Image (cartoon, coloured by chain):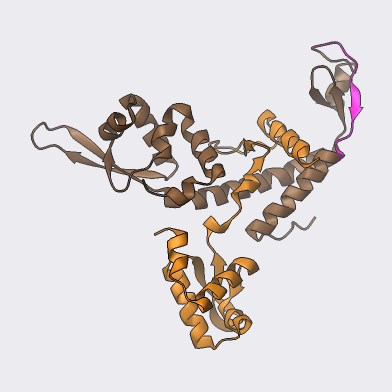
Chain colours: A brown, B orange
Amino acid sequence: MAFEGLLNDPVIQKYLHELVGPTGMPVAAAPPDGEVTDEELAEELGLELNDVRRALFILYENDLASYRRVRDEDSGWLTYLWTFHYENIPENLEEEMYRLLDALDERLEYERTHEFYLSEPAGIRFEFSEAMELGFQCPETGAPLEPMENDDMVGAMERRIEELRDELNVEAKAN
Amino acid sequence: MSVGEAEAQLSEDELAGLELVRESGGIHQSDFWKELDITSRKGSRIAERLFSLDLIEREETVYNGHNTYYLEPTARDLDFSKLMAGDMLSPFIGEEEVNANSNAFSQWLMNLAYEEY
C-alpha cells in the first residue's frame, strides 16, 4: 500500500471518509502502488464494481486519482487504469483550512452583532428577530425562549481563528 | 518517498535548516543563512537540497532590493486537526459553497465551544 504516512493521520482518514462515504472507504483507505483497474480493486476488496467506480470518480473529482483508458485489442473493450494521487491531500486540506477561516471570520461578525434566545427543552437557538416573531415561545415545545449568552462560542471562535492564522501565516484582517 | 525517509537522508545542517523554515513559517533565503550562521553559498545549497527533496517550497522574490528566494514549509507540515471541532470535521469539505450560517456549521461551532470549555 502507498501513502501510509498520510493515511495514519486520523484527520486524513476522516477527510477521505467524508468524501467517499462508508461504502467507498475500503477503496479510499488502501491505495495500491502504481496502476490498478476498477475490476481488480472490486475483486481484491470484495466490493460491487459500481461502488468501486463511484469512489474512484469522487477521488478523481478531488484531484486524488487519475485514470487512462486502454483498449483491449482482442475484445475491443475499454479498460480504465487508475493511479492514486494522495500527494495532493495536504494541498486540499490547506485549501479547506482557508475556507474554514473565512467562514469563521464571517460568522464571528454575525455572532458579535446579534442576540440569541434558547429553547432549552428543544435545544434550538433563535436570533432576536426570529424569537420576537415567535412571541418568545418555542414553536416545537411551547416553552418560553430565554436569553442566551454566546460569549463561550465567540471565545472559542476567536481562539480557532488565531490558531488557523498562525498555521497558515495569515495576517489578521484590518477592521 | 515519504517525509520520514527524506528527512532520514539529511545532514545535521540540513535538518537545522528544515527546522528553521518550519518554525519561522516562512523565511527569505538571505535571512536563512544568517540565522543558521553559515555562508550564503552553503545556505543556498541547503535550501536547494530541501527543495529537491520536496521538504520545503521555494519561490523567487525581491527582498531589500535583491533577488532571493522565499522558503516556506510544505502543506503537509500543517496541523490539519485545526479542521476539527471535537470529532467533527469542517462541514465545508466536499461542499462547493461555504455557507457561514448553515446548520452544519452551527453544529460544528457548538462542538468547538463545548470542546474548549
Q: Say left or right for A1 vs B19.
A: left
Say which quarter of the image contains residue A154.
top right
x and y, in percent, of residue A60 in the image: 39, 40
x and y, in percent, of residue B105 in the image: 68, 34
Q: Is residue B101 above or below residue A62?
A: above
Q: Is residue A105 above or below residue B20?
A: above
Measuring 77% from the left and 58% from the top, which residue is drawn there? A174
Residue that lies at the very extreme toward the left in this rendered image: A74
- Classify the position of the N terminus of chain B by image quarter: bottom left
Chief secondary structure of the magenta span? loop
Q: Say left or right for A127 vs B21.
A: right
x and y, in percent, of residue A95 in the image: 56, 49
Residue A147 shown in magenta: yes
Measuring 46% from the left and 70% from the top, which residue is drawn there? B51
Measuring 37% from the left and 48% from the top, which residue is drawn there? A2
Q: Say left or right for A70 vs A122.
A: left
Residue B54 seen in the current view: no
x and y, in percent, of residue B25 in the image: 62, 66
Query: Total number of numbered labels?
Result: 0
Q: Is residue A101 above or below residue B46?
A: above
Start and end of the magenta stretch?
Answer: A141-151
Say which quarter of the image contains residue A30.
top left
- Classify the position of the C terminus of chain B by image quarter: top right
Residue B30 seen in the current view: yes
Residue A172 shown in magenta: no
Say which quarter of the image contains residue A54.
top left
